Image: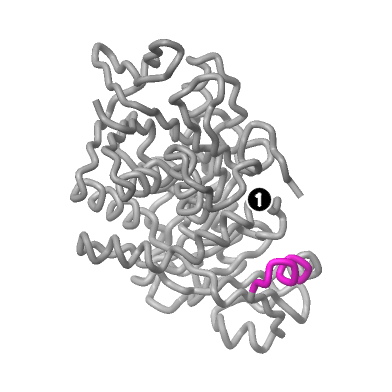
């Protein structure tokens, strides 16, 4: 038996495992496939919500906490494993003129470093940007926004946990939960039982289906996002650029990610030619030089979408021993460290780092 059994080995489950491990718990992570291979791997790795002023305050609070934590978190993991996660302060350039007023109000309310820069300054920052993509004489510039190369980050995080003694059980689907004396004490997978003092459900888009096995209704659904990866000369794109709900993200080696779609099609992860064409058109509209570059990969991932974009982070009062940390939608990477800390606080009955009332089934403060 282990102290904690975590169902789901994505960035949320693994970061929570790290918090619990550092508190002295023994931790086992069980995943339906290889850990970190779903939305944690498939996204863009921006350490900020896109258009953060569009989200409820509860999301901003998690994001702000996590953004402060990321440099030390990544440094620790890299030093322990020798693996690079490529945390870069790329900055975020937003070209949508109709977002400016809301952006300024949000930045004022939350003391965020957000600037308006003119077209000349924009083109000095991003020389290959299409001037025609500028919707007005000013654009939004957030110089402190970071990105992490998420496939490398989750790989390094898993290696870190392995080195620290976390047990991973891979390619195991949960068939049912073990309940003893009204308390959740583990799961069955096939003919195998995995037991623990406490169980955390952090299975991303698959969380609602697992919750149903316990008679729980959890408003989390899969939201497909398709992405393209361009191979470009280093420096083709210098910063993260966001325009009309599409973004380009430059990696250190010159690769450029373009995303992403929002599709409500259940658990279908197939890519489509229509999305390929639309993302290519948007990418080359933002950075015309991308039209001359090869597309290296086209893939899709499934985000765990909640009804209000706020994750669920709470103890299930009717089922002692069961905890839930899921529903992060597009923001698992940026909300992960704060979500993990809050979840560990709740599981270990510590004073909480953030108000947990915002993240339960009944939201206390959505404004």
Q: Is residue 367 above or below residue 324?
A: below
Q: Which residues are magenta?
A: 104-112
Q: Position of residue 259 (x, y in %)?
A: 54, 55
Q: Quadrant of the N terminus?
A: top left
Front residue of 279/122: it is 122
Prevailing secondary structure class for the magenta stretch in the rendered image? helix
Front residue of 177/55: it is 177
Q: Is residue 300 visible?
A: no
Q: Crowdedness of circle 1 by 10 Å Cα count: few (<14), some, many (20+)? A: many
Q: Tell me what residue is drawn at x 31 percent, y 35 percent.
A: 29
Q: Is residue 272 above or below residue 136?
A: above
Task: Indicate yes or no whether the magenta region holds residue 93.
Answer: no
Q: Position of residue 13 (x, y in %)?
A: 39, 41
Q: Quadrant of residue 309?
A: top right
Q: Is residue 308 visible?
A: yes
Residue that carries the numbered disc 1 in the rendered image = 58
Q: Is residue 347 above or below residue 190?
A: below
Q: Tell me what residue is drawn at x 42 percent, y 32 percent.
A: 200
Q: Position of residue 205 (x, y in %)?
A: 50, 33
Dot 1: element = helix
Q: Tell me what residue is drawn at x 65 percent, y 69 percent.
A: 94
* Colour scheme employed for the rendering of this structure: one colour
Q: Is residue 71 shown left or right of residue 123? A: left
């Amino acid at each position: 038996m282990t102290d904690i059994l975590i169902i789901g080995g994505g960035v949320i489950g693994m970061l929570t495992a790290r918090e619990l491990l550092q508190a002295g718990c023994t931790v086992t992570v069980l995943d339906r496939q290889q850990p970190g291979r779903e939305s944690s791997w498939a996204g863009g790795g921006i350490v900020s919500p896109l258009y953060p002023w569009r989200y409820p305050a509860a999301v901003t609070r998690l994001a702000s906490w996590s953004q402060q934590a990321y440099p030390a978190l990544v440094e620790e993991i890299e030093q322990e494993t020798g693996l690079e996660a490529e945390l870069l302060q790329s900055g975020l350039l937003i070209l949508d003129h109709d977002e400016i007023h809301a952006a300024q109000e949000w930045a004022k309310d939350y003391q965020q470093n957000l600037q308006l820069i003119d077209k000349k300054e924009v083109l000095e920052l991003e020389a290959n940007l299409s001037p025609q993509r500028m919707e007005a004489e000013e654009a939004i510039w957030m110089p402190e926004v970071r990105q992490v190369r998420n496939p490398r980050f989750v790989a390094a995080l898993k290696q870190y946990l392995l080195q620290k003694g976390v047990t991973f059980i891979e390619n195991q689907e949960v068939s049912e939960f073990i309940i003893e004396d009204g308390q959740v004490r583990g799961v069955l997978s096939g003919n195998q039982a995995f037991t623990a003092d406490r169980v955390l459900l952090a299975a991303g888009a698959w969380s609602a289906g697992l919750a149903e096995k316990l008679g729980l209704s959890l408003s989390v659904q899969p939201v497909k996002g398709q992405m393209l990866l361009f191979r470009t000369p280093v420096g083709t794109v210098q910063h993260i650029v966001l325009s009309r709900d599409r973004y380009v993200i430059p990696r250190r080696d010159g690769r450029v990610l373009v995303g992403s779609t929002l599709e409500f099609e259940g658990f279908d992860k197939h890519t489509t030619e229509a999305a390929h064409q639309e993302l290519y058109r948007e990418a080359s509209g933002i950075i015309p030089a991308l039209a001359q570059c090869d597309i290296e990969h086209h893939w899709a991932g499934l985000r765990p979408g909640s009804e209000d974009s706020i994750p669920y982070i709470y103890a299930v009062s009717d089922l002692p021993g069961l905890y839930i940390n899921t529903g992060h939608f597009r923001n698992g990477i940026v909300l992960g460290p704060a979500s993990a800390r809050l979840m560990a606080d709740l599981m270990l009955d510590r004073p909480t780092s953030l108000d947990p009332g915002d993240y339960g089934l009944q939201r206390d403060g959505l404004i």
